[in-house]
């Protein structure tokens, strides 16, 4: 089975209010890319991946008349994809949902959130992801309520073979200092965002430990907006959010080879899954943000990971149509996991 995670930049902007594809010459939300060109590129990438399931990060919106499931299934039908059914969980108000696009002949997923509902008050004990998590963020002996702007998607899955496993799709808090004007603003907002991102990862790790203790095969995948050594503020907190979710040194660990490579080598060549243009510096920044983490029992099945990077993956580089499509489709690149389930 091939399982993927793919952050599609502003996928929602490629559909109208009735979830019809906007295959026209109008501009997409990507710089200097038309909606038709982005949709065509996405069709090429999804077709090339040929995945049994894709955890779509920044999936189309659910609100009013709009439906994430309907939009994704129309996209799949337009490009005749094998992963042609969609499922989502708790909707949010960011226009960036988390959804699974999957092949119903290979996989049966069910939205199965865990934890107790909390309301605004919150709980310190792994509450349901649409609730609030109470944690002392600034070590002042009082807890604060942290929420997910994009609640993780929890799925109970059954492969066609009968193998049962769980998936959690994640889009963690961005640490970018949006709205900052002065250097002091940049520092204050960056530190506050990192605190919230780490709190979300601690919350997620609590849920992971529950599944691992129950002996449930688990895959945690998505965009963590973080990675070992990604910014200078990490030193203030000791560990990155990715390390917290992996559980390094804390009980049974999850595993992702790209994260392990980054942890082992803070200086030098590292894998990357995203590419952003920095206008003020007139150059591109690459970062490792997207992961597929697996439980020890799934790691024992000798899975194979792949980052579909247009410059670093030899097949992507040697296939001009795919290489250009990856650059046009999104500012992130897909990560896939091939595993016997």
Image (spheres, rainbow, N blue to C red):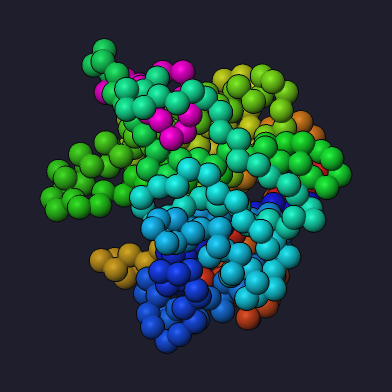
Q: Is residue 255 above or below residue 38?
A: above
Tell me, yes or no, if residue 13 can be seen here.
Answer: no
Q: Give the farthest residue toward the front.
A: 65
Q: Position of residue 291 (x, y in %)?
A: 57, 46
Q: Is residue 131 magenta?
A: yes
Q: Is residue 179 above or below residue 112?
A: below
Q: Position of residue 313 (x, y in %)?
A: 65, 65
**What is the chief secondary structure element of the magenta stretch?**
loop
Q: Position of residue 264 (x, y in %)?
A: 57, 38
Which of these two is toward me, 314 or 219?
A: 219
Q: Is residue 221 left or right of residue 108?
A: left
Q: Is residue 248 magenta?
A: no
Residue drawn where x is 56% and y is 28% of the image: 114
Which of these two is toward me, 107 or 65?
A: 65
Magenta span of residues: 124-138
Residue drawn where x is 76% and y is 31% of the image: 297
Q: Give the farthest residue toward the bottom.
A: 25
Q: Position of residue 279 (x, y in %)?
A: 29, 68
Which of these two is toward me, 32 or 42?
A: 42
Q: Is residue 248 above or below residue 171?
A: above
């Amino acid at each position: 089975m091939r399982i993927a995670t793919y952050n599609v930049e502003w996928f929602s902007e490629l559909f109208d209010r009735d979830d019809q594809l906007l295959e026209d010459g109008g501009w997409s939300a990507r710089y200097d890319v038309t909606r038709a060109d982005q949709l065509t590129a996405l069709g090429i990438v999804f077709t090339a991946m040929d995945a049994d399931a894709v955890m779509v990060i920044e999936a189309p919106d659910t609100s009013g008349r709009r439906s994430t499931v309907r939009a994704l299934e129309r996209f799949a039908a337009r490009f005749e994809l094998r992963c042609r059914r969609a499922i989502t969980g708790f909707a949010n108000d960011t226009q960036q949902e988390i959804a699974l696009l999957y092949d119903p002949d290979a996989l049966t997923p069910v939205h199965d959130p865990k934890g107790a509902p909390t309301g605004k008050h919150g709980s310190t004990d792994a509450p349901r992801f649409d609730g609030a998590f109470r944690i002392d963020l600034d070590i002042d002996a009082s807890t604060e309520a942290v929420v997910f702007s994009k609640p993780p998607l929890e799925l109970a899955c059954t492969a066609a073979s009968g193998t049962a496993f769980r998936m959690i799709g994640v889009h963690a808090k961005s640490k970018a200092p949006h709205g900052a004007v002065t250097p002091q603003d940049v520092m204050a907002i960056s530190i506050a965002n990192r605190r919230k991102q780490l709190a979300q990862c601690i919350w997620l790790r609590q849920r992971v430990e529950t599944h691992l203790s129950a002996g449930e095969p688990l895959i945690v995948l998505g965009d963590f907006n973080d990675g070992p050594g990604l910014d200078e503020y990490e030193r203030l907190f000791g560990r990155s959010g990715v390390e917290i979710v992996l559980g390094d040194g804390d009980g049974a660990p999850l595993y992702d080879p790209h994260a392990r490579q980054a942890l082992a080598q803070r200086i030098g060549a590292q894998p990357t899954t995203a590419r952003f243009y920095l206008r003020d510096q007139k150059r591109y920044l690459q970062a490792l943000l997207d992961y597929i983490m697996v439980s020890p029992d799934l790691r024992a099945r000798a899975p194979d990971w792949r980052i579909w990077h247009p410059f670093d993956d030899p097949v992507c580089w040697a296939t001009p149509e795919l290489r250009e499509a990856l650059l046009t489709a999104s500012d992130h690149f897909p990560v896939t996991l091939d595993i016997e389930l």
